[in-house]
């Protein structure tokens, strides 16, 4: 079986796939059709292409897509060529961005990757929002321009963590922040004002 046939078999497998047109119209998904992220199928195709360097993405890859008539998930030739030039494989066969060596994930795996980082806190505790964002950024590409998730997505996943202890902690933190925001203006506004008044009165007394 030649490479083109292998590619067709990969795409023809019964892997559940949402079309780009459905994704782009879904609430909370800000990706224009065909750009900004890698589906599971496209991920596998790129892996196969990178493992076979002599393959021409402008011919075989596009032909593979078009023969399956999956036009809803067909990126442009220029976009595919750009992707193939910006990514490579690491020692474990995972797609990584050439620019920084960060791991590229299929978008279907975004939420799971965030949760794994979020749950990896010290002593079995969950990380906070900022720590989770940092942990994700250390391993994975971030931003649509790098085929990665947005920071807002990471925050949303953490905020919706179903763990009861995590939810309680986040609620307590939110209450504390609101209390501090409520109290801070009074303290911050009063102290400088009273100090200035004391200075003025001390000057006029001489």
Image: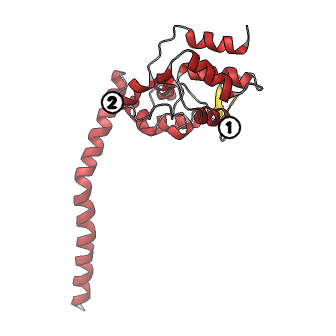
**Tally of numbered tags:** 2
Q: Secondary structure at mark 1?
A: loop
Q: In the picture, which quadrant includes the C terminus? A: bottom left
In-image side of 102 versus 113 (left or right) = right
Residue 52 at what x, y percent from top left?
75, 22
Q: Residue placed at 37% from the left, 21% from the top?
A: 163
Q: Residue placed at 44% from the left, 19% from the top?
A: 18
Observer-nearest residue: 7 or 44? 7
Q: Indicate how the structure is coloured in the image.
A: secondary structure
Going by the picture, which residue comes out furthest to the bottom? Answer: 206
Q: Residue placed at 71% from the left, 15% from the top?
A: 3
Residue 134 at what x, y percent from top left?
52, 39
**Residue 124 visible, this orientation:** no
From the image, tell me which residue sits under label 2: 27
Q: Secondary structure at mark 2?
A: loop
Q: In the picture, which quadrant includes the N terminus? A: top right
Dividing the picture into quarters, in which one does residue 167 lie?
A: top left
Q: CA distance from mark 2 to mark 1?
A: 31 Å
Residue 184 at what x, y percent from top left?
27, 55
Dividing the picture into quarters, in which one does residue 139 lie?
A: top right
Assess disc 1: are there few (<14), some (14-19) or many (≥20) residues with their C-alpha within 10 Å of its C-alpha: some
From the image, tell me which residue sits under label 1: 98
**Residue 171 visible, this orientation:** yes
In-image side of 87 versus 191 (left or right) = right
| Picture layout, residue 123 above or below residue 200 | above
Observer-nearest residue: 40 or 174? 40
The disc, 2 or 1, on the residue closer to the chain's N-terminal end is 2
Residue 41 at what x, y percent from top left?
56, 19
């Amino acid at each position: 079986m030649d490479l083109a046939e292998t590619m067709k078999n990969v795409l023809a497998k019964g892997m559940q796939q949402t079309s780009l047109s459905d994704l782009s119209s879904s609430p909370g998904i800000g990706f224009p059709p065909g750009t900004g992220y890698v589906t599971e199928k496209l991920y596998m195709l790129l892996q196969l292409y990178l493992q076979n360097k002599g393959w021409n993405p402008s011919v075989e890859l596009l032909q593979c897509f078009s023969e399956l008539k999956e036009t809803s998930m067909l990126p442009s030739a220029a976009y595919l060529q750009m992707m193939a030039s910006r990514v490579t494989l690491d020692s474990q066969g995972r797609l990584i961005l050439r620019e920084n060596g960060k791991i590229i994930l299929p978008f279907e795996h975004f939420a799971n990757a965030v949760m794994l980082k979020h749950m990896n806190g010290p002593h079995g505790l969950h990380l906070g929002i900022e720590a989770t964002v940092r942990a994700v950024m250390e391993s994975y590409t971030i931003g649509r321009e790098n085929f990665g998730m947005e920071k807002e997505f990471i925050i949303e996943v953490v905020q919706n963590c179903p763990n009861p202890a995590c939810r309680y902690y986040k609620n307590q933190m939110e209450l504390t922040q609101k209390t501090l925001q409520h109290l801070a203006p009074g303290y911050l506004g009063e102290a400088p004002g009273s100090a200035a008044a004391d200075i003025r009165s001390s000057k006029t007394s001489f």
